[in-house]
Image (tube, helix red, strand yellow):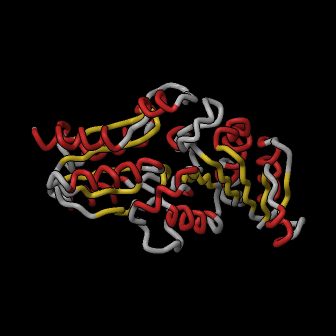
């Protein structure tokens, strides 16, 4: 395993050696191109970029190279490359740094898109990514490492490896189902705690990966909760949200009636620097609680 990074990690260089740890300038297209070449020659490579938004400058290497070699070579070559990057997390860094990119990246065939919703999920998904034979992007929110997670129950009991394409039950419940991904898992957990005081016991589902998307697994969990109402929560805009495909599947399979399904998504605008503007444009627990109460009153 080799690792490229754009920021200083002297401790890792001392621990693993300069032949495995490489610190590079901010040149994501070059980094990913080097990683693809090394992977084709048999190395496993971890590319750690400061922000997931910077991955857009390396789209040619990601979309046209890394994810295509297995298909174009009829399985003769694989590209075991893992890319880690931070998404948006309330840091108010502005439009060029904060992106909810999982919906966009999930449209690239051949790419696994992991979006951990809790600290243990981040560790578990990364463990799986490091032994996966194909390209994986792990999108981590800065919120996962913030102190406010201490007030939430950790959905994953351990940091053991988690399979891709398998959603997890972050909280049991029987009256309705809240489905989150990334940051919105914590949003759903907080909303569920508020709804408990209303006598509504919400099941919370963590998608864990945007691609592959666990359509059948979530459908089974929704059916198991006899309440019937389903609220899908995503920071990505509705037009590119994986929740749109999930909602369509839930309705088509009869797991939920159309009038019992809600989608709460981010606004289709660049991320502002202003905290009040950010709060107005992204889903929060009040949006989820209000939707649940409206559904209960129908």
159 on left or right of 232: right
- Residue drawn 57% across the image and 52% down it: 140
121 on left or right of 176: right
For the N terminus, the quadrant is bottom right
277 on left or right of 126: left
Q: Image quadrant of residue 175?
A: bottom left
Q: Can residue 248 be seen in this view?
A: no
Question: Can you say whether 80 is above or below 95 in the image?
Answer: below
- Residue drawn 53% across the image and 51% down it: 143
Q: Where is residue 205 in the image (x, y as percent from the top left)?
A: 34, 56
Between 96 and 59, the one lying in front of the other is: 96
Q: Where is residue 95 in the image (x, y as percent from the top left)?
A: 61, 29
Between 297 and 79, the one lying in front of the other is: 297
Question: Can you say whether 57 is above or below 199 in the image?
Answer: above
Q: Position of residue 189 (x, y in %)?
A: 34, 55
For the C terminus, the quadrant is top left
Between 156 and 73, the one lying in front of the other is: 156
Q: Image quadrant of residue 57?
A: top right
- Residue drawn 52% across the image and 72% down it: 159
- Residue drawn 23% across the image and 61% down it: 173
Between 216 and 293, the one lying in front of the other is: 293
């Amino acid at each position: 395993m080799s690792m490229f990074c754009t920021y200083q990690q002297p401790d890792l260089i001392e621990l693993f050696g300069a032949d495995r740890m490489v610190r590079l300038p901010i040149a994501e297209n070059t980094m990913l191109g080097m990683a693809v070449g090394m992977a084709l020659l048999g190395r496993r490579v971890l590319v750690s970029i400061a922000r997931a938004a910077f991955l857009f400058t390396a789209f040619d290497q990601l979309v046209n190279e890394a994810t295509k070699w297995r298909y174009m070579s009829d399985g003769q070559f694989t590209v075991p490359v893992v890319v880690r990057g931070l998404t948006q997390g309330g840091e108010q860094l502005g439009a060029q740094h904060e992106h909810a990119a999982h919906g966009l990246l999930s449209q690239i065939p051949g790419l696994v898109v992991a979006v951990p919703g809790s600290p243990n999920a981040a560790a578990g998904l990364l463990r799986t990514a490091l032994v996966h034979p194909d390209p994986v992007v792990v999108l981590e929110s800065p919120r996962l490492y913030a102190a406010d997670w201490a007030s939430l129950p950790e959905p994953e009991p351990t940091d053991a490896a988690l399979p891709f394409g398998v959603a997890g039950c972050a909280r049991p419940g029987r009256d309705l189902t809240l489905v989150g991904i990334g940051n919105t898992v914590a949003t759903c957990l907080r909303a569920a705690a508020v709804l408990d005081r209303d006598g509504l016991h919400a099941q919370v589902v963590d998608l864990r990966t945007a691609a592959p998307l666990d359509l059948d697994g979530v459908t089974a969990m929704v059916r198991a909760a006899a309440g019937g109402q389903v609220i899908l929560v995503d920071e990505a805009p509705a037009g590119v949200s994986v929740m749109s495909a999930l909602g369509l599947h839930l309705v088509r399979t009869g797991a939920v009636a159309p009038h019992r399904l809600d989608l709460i998504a981010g606004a289709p605008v660049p991320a502002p620097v202003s905290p009040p503007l950010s709060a107005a444009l992204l889903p929060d627990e009040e949006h989820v609680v209000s939707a649940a109460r409206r559904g209960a009153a129908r």
